[in-house]
Amino acid sequence: MAKGILVDYEWCSGCHTCEMACAVELAHGHFPEGHCGVKIHEEGVYKVAEDKWTDINMPVFTDLCDQCATRVAAGQEPTCVKHCQAHCLTYGEISDLVPLLSKKSKQVLYHL
């Protein structure tokens, strides 16, 4: 079965915990220097309406992400999901995650 990571951008605070967890746990020879499997794209604060502002932070999974294959094989969830402080990352079967997309806006499903 195909697995993926669902990202709820409505709740991501851009804390970089997913990025740091990935870089620290897999730092020893897994990635090229200065790279990891997930990066936070910071769009920045801007006005979207007369009285509404937004600050967009988006975890983006790179081609280096293998969804923590070693951790998953051992029955654990990917390190980014485990350490996400906002609980905005969900790992699971694509077939289980797809129905969640219709429940709210600002979500993306990554299948790597």
Image (cartoon, rainbow, N blue to C red):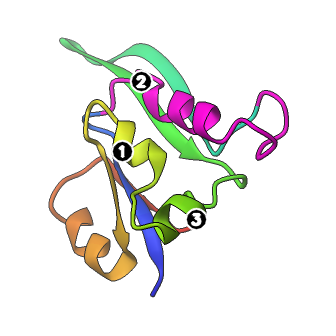
Tell me the residue at 41%/13% (across/down).
45
Q: Residues within 10 Å of mark 1 (few under 14, many from 20)?
A: some
Which of the two labelled residues, at mark 3 and mark 1, occupies the earlier sequence position?
3
Residues under numbered marks 1 and 2 in contact, where contact means CB atoms less than 8 Å apart? no
- Image coords of residue 19 (percent x, y): 54, 32
Q: Residues within 10 Å of mark 3 (few under 14, many from 20)?
A: few
Query: Which of the 4 image quarters holds residue 112?
Result: bottom right
- Give the residue at the far front of this rendering: 74
Name the side, left or right, on which 18 lies relative to 7: right
- Toward the viewer: 28 or 57? 28
Amino acid bearing label 1: Lys
Residue 49, compared with residue 77, is above or below; it is above
Mark 3 to mark 2 CA distance (whole Å):
24 Å
- Image coords of residue 63 (percent x, y): 71, 55
Query: Which of the 4 image quarters holds residue 4?
Result: bottom left
Query: Which of the 4 image quarters holds residue 11?
Result: top left
Which of the two labelled residues, at mark 1 and mark 2, occupies the earlier sequence position?
2
Tell me the residue at 38%/76% (across/down).
94
Residue 36, compared with residue 69, is above or below; it is above
- Toward the viewer: 11 or 64? 64
Numbered disc 1: secondary structure? helix
- Residue 82: which disc? 1
What is the magenta range? 12-34
Identify the residue under disc 3. 69
Numbered disc 2: secondary structure? loop
Mark 1 to mark 2 CA distance (whole Å):
16 Å
Identify the residue under disc 2. 14
Tell me the residue at 35%/69% (across/down).
92
- Image coords of residue 65 (percent x, y): 64, 54
- Image coords of residue 55 (percent x, y): 37, 19
